[in-house]
Image (cartoon, grey):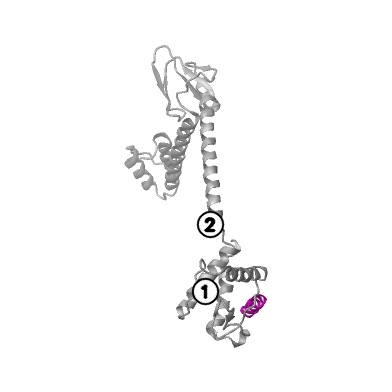
């Protein structure tokens, strides 16, 4: 923060402190330039000597006053340059010594704060940067729309009008004769079937679905499959944990409707139950 602003704040706090004791002082705006320069000199002293004590601060104030022709007087008089605090620090009353403590505390507290002008400049820079980011995003969007990257796949079945994919988890619906741009790995799966043909993707091709959507559908499908695998795994572990043949038989009958009559071993019954889970899922 600029020295002048620190000085104005420190001086204004001192004015408020004096007012609390019935000692009215001129505001910063109405204070003479000589007073302002003296306060600014005090701020500079503290900034250059951050470990200075209140007593040293007062001594520096006395030095500045002496250099500008001030002397001791019972009453503060700007015209005659007299001041009742032109005394050694130890002889000042406690309420006057407190001013040096306040001054030091204020300077140290606000010295690293940015100026309001700096805030405004930073705000302008942020607005400018945000606009640049928005412009960049727009340019990227236009570029993405113009440059389609992927492999074109066209459905060419002779009799069926459309094909809905439930095999590879894309969730796509292919219309006969319509080209869809797909990620290469996904496209190759469909191109392994005779009813699909490859089409060179170029900027004139109208994709029916963008890569991100396909990837999201596949990821969703894979997540569902993993969840189902976890359910099956837990069910199989539960079957393995059954300790009696009757428990396994009851499980098979209640879940899959099959009644096991043979006198099989526990392990064989568990194998049958596990096979049911693999074949029909968890019921």
Q: Residue furthest front?
A: 79
Q: Tell me the crowding category of disc 1: few under 14, some 14 to 19, or many 20 or more residues within 10 angstroms, Cα based.
A: some
Mark 1 or mark 2, earlier in chain: 1
The answer to whether 136 is drawn above or below residue 159 in the figure is: below
**Position of the C terminus by quadrant:** top left
Does the magenta segment cover residue 145? no
Q: Say which element carries label 1.
A: helix
The answer to whether 271 is drawn above or below residue 123 in the figure is: above
Residue 196: give x, y in percent of width and height: 48, 17
Residue of label 1 = 14
Tally of numbered tags:
2
**SS assignment for the magenta stretch, majority:** helix
Residue 100: give x, y in percent of width and height: 58, 77
Q: Nearer the viewer, residue 15 or 207?
A: 15
**Position of the N terminus by quadrant:** bottom right
Q: Nearer the viewer, residue 117 or 22?
A: 22
Quadrant in which residue 202 is drawn: top right
Q: Which mark is residue 116?
A: 2
Name the residue located 56 percent from the left edge and 63 percent from the top edge. 5
Whether residue 85 appears in this view of the structure is yes
Q: Say which element carries label 2.
A: helix
- Look at the image and give the residue range highlighted in magenta: 53-67
Q: Tell me the crowding category of disc 2: few under 14, some 14 to 19, or many 20 or more residues within 10 angstroms, Cα based.
A: few
Residue 215: give x, y in percent of width and height: 49, 32
Whether residue 188 appears in this view of the structure is no
Q: CA distance from mark 1 to mark 2?
A: 22 Å
């Amino acid at each position: 923060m600029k020295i002048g602003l620190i000085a104005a704040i420190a001086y204004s706090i001192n004015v408020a402190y004096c007012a609390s004791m019935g000692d009215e002082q001129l505001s910063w705006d109405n204070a003479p330039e000589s007073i302002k320069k003296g306060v600014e000199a005090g701020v500079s002293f503290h900034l250059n000597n951050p470990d200075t004590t209140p007593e040293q601060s007062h001594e520096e104030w006395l030095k500045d006053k002496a250099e500008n022709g001030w002397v001791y007087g019972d009453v503060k008089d700007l015209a005659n340059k007299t001041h009742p605090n032109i005394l050694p620090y130890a002889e000042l009353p406690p309420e006057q010594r407190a001013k040096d403590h306040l001054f030091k505390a204020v300077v140290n507290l606000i010295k690293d704060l940015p100026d309001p002008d700096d805030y405004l400049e930073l705000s302008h820079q942020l607005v400018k940067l945000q606009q640049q980011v928005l412009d960049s995003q727009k340019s990227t969007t236009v570029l993405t729309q113009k440059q389609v990257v992927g492999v074109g796949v066209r459905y060419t079945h002779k009799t069926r009008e459309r094909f809905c994919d439930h095999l590879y988890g894309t969730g796509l619906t292919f219309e006969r004769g319509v080209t869809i741009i797909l990620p290469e790995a996904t496209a190759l799966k469909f191109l392994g079937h005779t009813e699909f043909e490859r089409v060179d993707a170029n900027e004139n091709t109208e994709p029916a679905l963008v890569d991100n959507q396909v990837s999201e559908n596949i990821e969703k499908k894979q997540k569902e499959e993993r969840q189902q695998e976890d359910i099956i795994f837990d069910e199989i572990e539960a079957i393995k944990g059954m300790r009696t043949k009757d428990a396994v038989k009851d499980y098979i009958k209640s879940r899959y409707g099959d009644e096991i009559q043979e006198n099989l071993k526990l392990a064989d019954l568990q194998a049958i139950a596990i096979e049911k889970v693999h074949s029909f899922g968890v019921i």
